Image (cartoon, rainbow, N blue to C red):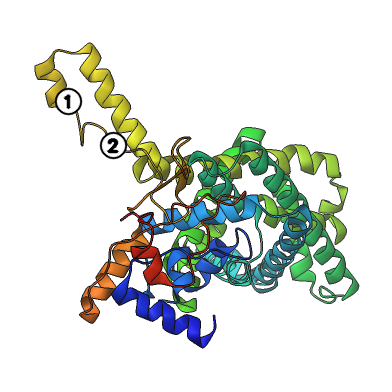
Amino acid sequence: MSASGSAGAKMSTSTAPLLPLSDPARGHAEERAQIGGLTAATVSRGDAALIRLFITPLEVWNKIVATGVAKSRYSWPKTMLLSFLAGAYLSFGMALAFLVGGQLRAVRANDPGLYNLVLGAFGLPFGLTMIILMGADLFTSDVSFMLAAWCEGKARIGAVAWNLGWCWIGNLCGSLFMVQMYLWGDVFAGREAFSSRWNAALAKTAPAFGVNLVRGVLCNWLVNIAVWQAMTAQDVTGKFVGVLIPVTIFVASGFEHCIANQFGLPMGMRLGGPASALSPGHALARNRVPVTLGNALGAGVFIVGFYFLAIGTGHDRLVNGWNGAVARHLPPWLADWLQTGEQQLPGRFIGDVSIHGCGHGASGLTPSGRGFSAALRALGSSLRGTPHPAAAVTAAAAPPDGLPTPPPADPAAAAHGNGKASA
């Protein structure tokens, strides 16, 4: 934004309602909003005073939905490239885990608890942190992003399946590329203890289908807790700590991660020893399929499902359905006692991407008006001792992609010119 544009924006905060700015990147304001931990509307105004060290769970949910919206608009080359990088980054972490832990034969034999802790703390947390900070696409976390956007009505199920399919394939390509690079680089030469540790590939394919399915559920529940906590923190140190604890738990517990196994199983099969007898079909049927399904269920049920019903619009639907059911089928005195919350909740997504088509009126747009950015701007203004004007949106027709239209050149004219700005 130019100096004159910045000055005009600052003047508008004291003279006219704030107006949303259009994003020339068409749908990627949500991505850039994650960088500073701010909402898209706040980032567009450059209000850096509202940056905090952490954000609330409802704000994280809004960011998860916004991220899913952005990813649903990716082209397949973009998804493939970012997913390839995620597979490579996680492979770096997986290899480090066994470079450190795989050679601790004495510790493994004499103190298995310490061995598991070292194996969990060194490696995969580093890989997942790289993925988060570098903006790569990991299948196991994209499940949460895409399903959250779908649950809130912001992405079609076809876009969800399209993104997750390409993401899984891209992660596989990145992982297999790293397998070959480690072999070409003779990284394991002279490290017999490390090589023998890769016989764990046999242990990963030995359990029954249902056992690996449950291990996959538990694993991705923890992985998505790590991603959630990383999104909560607004500094690099906080993001790493948020990732470290859940990922250490899942590795030390022996849970199964489908993308980590895309590197681990092929590497074990290529290094020789007993694991070389595994066939790709056996590894697919006994590990990759059940673990992928379990990872999807873990994120979809315990992260998206629970939080959609607790703090998303699913909560409003749940409360409204319950209140309506008891009112219809029970006596009034008992219904009044059993009903919970308000009689009728709005049932609309309250994040900053919440611009709804109402199907009637001149504009077809109804703003949420309850977004956290509005509350934060009000709080920031009160702390600075400046009055905060009521939030407003333009009532002009929306562009084809559903983004709000740019405000007029003169913000004061928007507030007093034609009366189309509504508080």
> Which marked residue is nearer to the observer: mark 1 or mark 2?
2
In the figure, is residue 384 to the left or right of 305?
Answer: left
Q: Are marks 1 and 2 in contact (CB under 8 Å)?
A: no
Q: Quadrant of residue 196?
A: bottom right
| Closer to us: 372 or 230 | 372
- Residue pointed to by mark 1: 338
- Residue 215 placement (x, y as % from top left): 57, 44
In the image: residue 383, left or right of residue 209: left
Q: Amino acid at mark 2?
A: Leu
Residue 369, position as x, y percentages in the image: 34, 53
Q: Residue at the location (87% across, 76% down)?
A: 185
Measuring 28% from the left and 74% from the top, which residue is drawn there?
380
First-in-chain label (1 vs 2) = 1
Q: List x then y, in percent, for residue 362.
A: 46, 42
When the figure is inspected, residue 290 is found, relative to residue 326, above or below; the finding is below
Residue at (26%, 32%) from the top-left corner?
344
The answer to whether one can see residue 199 in this image is no
Q: Horizontal and vertical percent for residue 324?
A: 27, 22
Q: Secondary structure at mark 2?
A: loop
Q: Which residue is mark 2?
A: 345
